[in-house]
Image: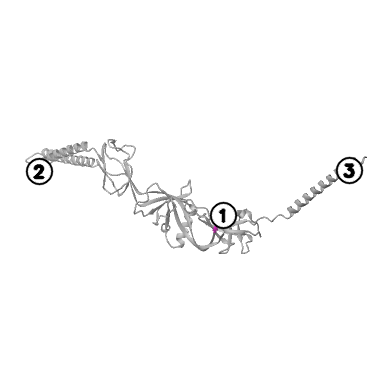
């Protein structure tokens, strides 16, 4: 090999060696950087303190409102509607005029009945006078027994005809009165279902309107047999009747109606198809705020837990029938702890065992922690509740 070729070969080997050393250096540097990577960041969780307060335990049902009395207004005679004397949806008084039917036909019938009665009265008076004359003569045998019997029969027949005429006159007077349709109760009058000029009759398929007594207003709801037993036992424990359990009404906007109600009607038996009792409660309604057809939640307070411990429902994890809570200690280390839960109150859960007052539990981020892990905490910010949600119904306990 010539010196020139030899130098070229040595140069190539030197370059390959240098490249190999460079690659090895890069691999060693990468390995060192991998071993020297920073530890993972401390997880951030949202925590809340265990609250302690007196908690009322209650039952809730969806209720439908109805008038305490719903007077269905129907025509009692046939005729044309000529006038409506009330404004729909307004409060009307008992005896207030609502509708008028064309009275002319009934005025004529009344006048005719009055004339017929006058005729029958004249005939009765004539037969009575005739009988009065014949009786003394018959006693002296001045007239025959047949004359007396004829006079007596004529008088009795005239009396019967007069009585029939009186009845016809009363009927005609009633029918004339029925042309003026009045409210039988004081209440809210509904929308009229007939227009001026309509031919009305007692057999028409729809009513003219309905007047509802809404103070107090009636609220219907259904309770299960188990709930009934709870209410009955609570009433017995307090020494009162089931009907005296105080009731609250939560309206659809979530507000609590200021007037308390009480049970007015408790059905005598449970519905065999649903296993529930139908109950009606009465709530004072002095301003007529509540109307038939509205819905609300009826709440009955059964008892009060003194010094109950509460945490948000989202802070409790259910796993294989057990309930767990992640507690953060003073050193910011996590302790996964089993607890025993009670009733649900709104968005919170009563914890009967496993927690102490003012301990901090994780309400957001429990999926990121393990027992013994150190965490960074910040206050839990609950999501805004819907405007019309109201409080959630507590879980029924057997």
Q: Is residue 398 visible?
A: no
Instruction: Quote the CA–CA distance across marks 1 and 3.
Output: 78 Å
What residue is disc 3 on? 7
Quarter of the view holding residue 128: top left
Q: Whole-percent x and y of residue 298? A: 44, 53
Task: Say if 142 sits above or below 247 in the image.
Answer: above
Q: Which residue is drawn at the image coordinates 8% and 39% (left, top)?
A: 143
Instruction: Quote the CA–CA distance across marks 2 and 3.
Output: 175 Å
Split into 4 quadrants, where in the image is the N terminus?
top right
Q: Nearer the viewer, mark 2 or mark 3?
A: 3
Left or right: 76 as drawn, with respect to 342: left
Q: Secondary structure at mark 3?
A: helix
**N-term-proximal mark, 2 vs 3:** 3
Q: Whole-percent x and y of residue 269? A: 44, 50
Work out whether residue 134 or residue 121 is closer to the camera in this orientation and state it. 121
Work out whether residue 321 or residue 365 is closer to the camera in this orientation and state it. 365
What residue is disc 2 on? 132
Work out whether residue 393 or residue 144 is closer to the camera in this orientation and state it. 393
Q: Whole-percent x and y of residue 107? A: 19, 38
What residue is disc 1 on? 314
Instruction: Quote the CA–CA distance across marks 2 and 1.
Output: 102 Å
Q: Secondary structure at mark 2?
A: helix
Residue 312 lies in the magenta-colored region: yes
């Amino acid at each position: 090999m010539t010196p020139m070729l030899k130098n070229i070969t040595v140069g190539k080997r030197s370059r390959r060696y240098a490249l190999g050393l460079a690659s090895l250096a890069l691999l060693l540097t990468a390995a060192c950087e991998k071993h020297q990577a920073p530890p993972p960041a401390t997880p951030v969780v949202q925590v809340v303190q265990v609250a302690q307060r007196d908690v009322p335990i209650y039952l809730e049902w969806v209720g439908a409102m109805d008038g305490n009395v719903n007077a269905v207004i129907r025509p009692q005679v046939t005729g044309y509607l000529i006038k409506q004397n009330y404004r729909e949806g307004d409060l009307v008084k008992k005896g207030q005029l609502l509708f008028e039917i064309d009275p002319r036909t009934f005025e004529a019938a009344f006048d005719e009945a009055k004339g017929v009665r006058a005729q029958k009265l004249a005939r009765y008076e004539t037969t009575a006078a005739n009988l009065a004359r014949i009786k003394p003569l018959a006693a002296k045998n001045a007239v025959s027994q047949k004359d007396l019997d004829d006079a007596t029969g004529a008088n009795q027949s005239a009396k019967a005809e007069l009585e029939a005429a009186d009845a016809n006159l009363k009927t005609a007077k009633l029918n004339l009165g029925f042309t003026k349709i009045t409210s039988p109760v004081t209440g809210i009058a509904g929308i009229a279902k007939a227009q001026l000029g309509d031919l009305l009759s007692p057999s028409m398929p729809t009513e003219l309107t309905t007047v509802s007594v809404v103070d107090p207003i009636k609220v219907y709801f259904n309770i299960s047999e188990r709930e009934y037993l709870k209410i009955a036992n609570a009433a017995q424990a307090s020494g009162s009747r089931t009907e005296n359990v105080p009731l609250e009404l939560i309206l659809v906007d979530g507000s609590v109606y200021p007037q308390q109600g009480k049970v007015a009607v408790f059905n005598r038996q449970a519905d065999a198809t649903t296993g529930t009792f139908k109950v009606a409660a009465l709530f004072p309604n002095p301003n007529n705020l509540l109307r038939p057809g509205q819905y609300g939640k009826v709440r009955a307070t059964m008892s009060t837990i003194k010094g109950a411990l509460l945490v948000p429902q989202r802070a409790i994890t259910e796993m294989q029938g057990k309930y767990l809570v992640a507690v953060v200690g003073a050193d910011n280390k996590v302790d996964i702890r089993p607890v025993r839960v009670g009733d649900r109150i709104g968005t919170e859960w009563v914890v009967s065992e496993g927690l102490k007052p003012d301990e901090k539990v994780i309400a957001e981020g429990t999926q990121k922690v393990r027992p013994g892990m150190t965490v960074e905490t910040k206050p839990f910010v609950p999501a805004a509740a819907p405007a019309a949600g109201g409080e959630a119904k507590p879980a029924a306990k057997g």
